[in-house]
Image (cartoon, rainbow, N blue to C red):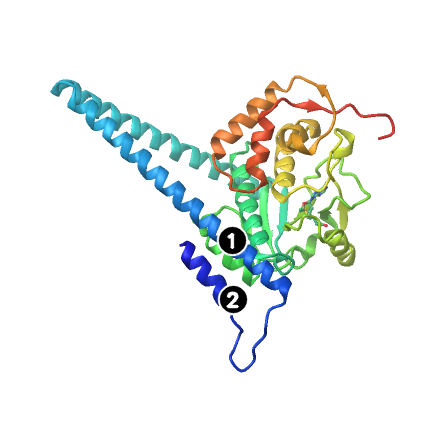
Amino acid sequence: MAAAASENVDNQLKPESESEPKPLSKNAQKKLLKQQKYQVKKAEKKAQEKEQKKKAQERKHKEWEETLANVTEEERLKLIESRITLRKERMEKRSEEKEKKIERLTQAKEIGQNIVVDVDFAHCMSETEISSLIQQIMYCYAVNGRSTSPCHLWLTGIKEQMSSHLDKLPGFDKWFIEKETRCYIEAMADRKDNLVYLTADSETVLDDLDPKDIYIIGGLVDRNRFKGITMNKAQEQGIKTAKLPIGEYMKMSTSQVLTVNQVLEILVNFLETRDWKTSFFTVIPQRKRTGVDPVDCSKLQSLSEEHQDKEGHVGESAEEHDLLERKKVCIEVPLESGS
Ligand SMILES: C[S@@+](CC[C@H](N)C(=O)[O-])C[C@H]1O[C@@H](n2cnc3c(N)ncnc32)[C@H](O)[C@@H]1O
């Protein structure tokens, strides 16, 4: 797989056609090399994980065989039977949970808060950034599916590049989500007055979520390279904008620009709790906050622990780190007057 990734990048490094050689600029070559390294590392990590999983399975199987070999025939039968029962119960529980999730998402489709992730920014991102965005979208879907008050989630502006990435996700065709090739401005033309683009650059602070409104999150991973891109887009389209009320509850050590999945998770958490403070403290990782006023965050801690257990592996991105960060002691930031 690593070899395939390397071959892939080698091909990209080749000129498009023999008659029209287009040598790559130094920057483009650097970018491709970086991508190549990323792909190789990713493939190696995947292979390593696969190997570890295989070994763990083999070890468990061996242990099971040894247990069976050291008991009487009667005990052996009992052990096998209880194992079958346990598996059956686990499967039943899983399918029950799945059914409940579908029920919640079906209800959200009818009466839930509409939230859009605008994925029409593939042209602004590198392959690595697109992969990171895809991970964030997967995370958004998982978080929403687990929520007791899920939103009605949309992906709009799914064009060629994004589409081919999304289609590669296992089970994406069965995702309980609205998938739109059009931009929200077209797809929701009759509700233009209710469209609210969420952007950290807005002057308007979001106090509450209005069930009639449709909140849009920019599907972009850019380390804020394109500052103001979503604000400008919303202004050009003549739709409302708003920023999250982060500054009213905590101080950030970095900018208030959050990732797509953090914003979605905050909104979903707010739909459950109607409490911005809880939502921010549950979702925003400690490394992004400043201050030293400890509060009892046991509830938040158990929430994030549960979150991590269920989610397990999020990926090599900052999110994995963020989840671990959230398990550390929560610190509430004392707001100085006027800040
Ligand atoms: C990684 S940010 C993209 C930043 C991009 N440069 C921009 O100008 O939108 C992903 C998206 O999350 C949403 N977002 C991030 N921080 C936000 C905040 N503090 N308030 C409202 N929305 C925010 C915005 O919709 C944003 O487009």
Q: CA distance from mark 1 to mark 2?
A: 14 Å
* Label 1 Cα crowd, 10 Å radius (few <14 / some 14-19 / many 20+): some
197 or 30: which is nearer to us? 30
The residue positioned 13% from the left and 18% from the top of the image is 72
Residue to which mark 1 is pinned: 37
Is the residue 242 above or below the residue 157 in the image?
above
Helix or strand or loop: what does disc 2 sit on?
helix
* Label 2 Cα crowd, 10 Å radius (few <14 / some 14-19 / many 20+): few
Location of residue 160 by image quarter:
bottom right
Residue 159 is at least partly visible in this image: yes
State how many labels appear. 2
Residue to which mark 2 is pinned: 12
Q: Quadrant of the C terminus?
A: top right
Q: Quadrant of the N terminus?
A: bottom left
Is the residue 155 above or below the residue 297 in the image?
below
The answer to whether the residue bearing label 1 lies less than 8 angstroms from the nearest atom of ligand 1 is: no
State which tag comes first along the sequence, 1 or 2. 2
Query: Left or right: where does residue 135 sit relative to residue 205?
Result: left
Q: Position of residue 39 (x, y in %)?
A: 49, 53
Q: Amino acid at mark 2?
A: Gln
Looking at the image, is mark 1 or mark 2 nearer the viewer? Answer: 1
Query: Left or right: where does residue 73 sit relative to residue 252?
Result: left
Q: Amino acid at mark 1?
A: Lys
Location of residue 143 by image quarter:
top right
Q: Position of residue 193 (x, y in %)?
A: 75, 51
Location of residue 148 by image quarter:
top right
Furthest residue to the right? 338
Is the residue 179 above or below the residue 102 in the image?
below
Furthest residue to the front? 26
Q: Position of residue 54 (x, y in %)?
A: 32, 39
Q: Position of residue 17 (x, y in %)?
A: 52, 77
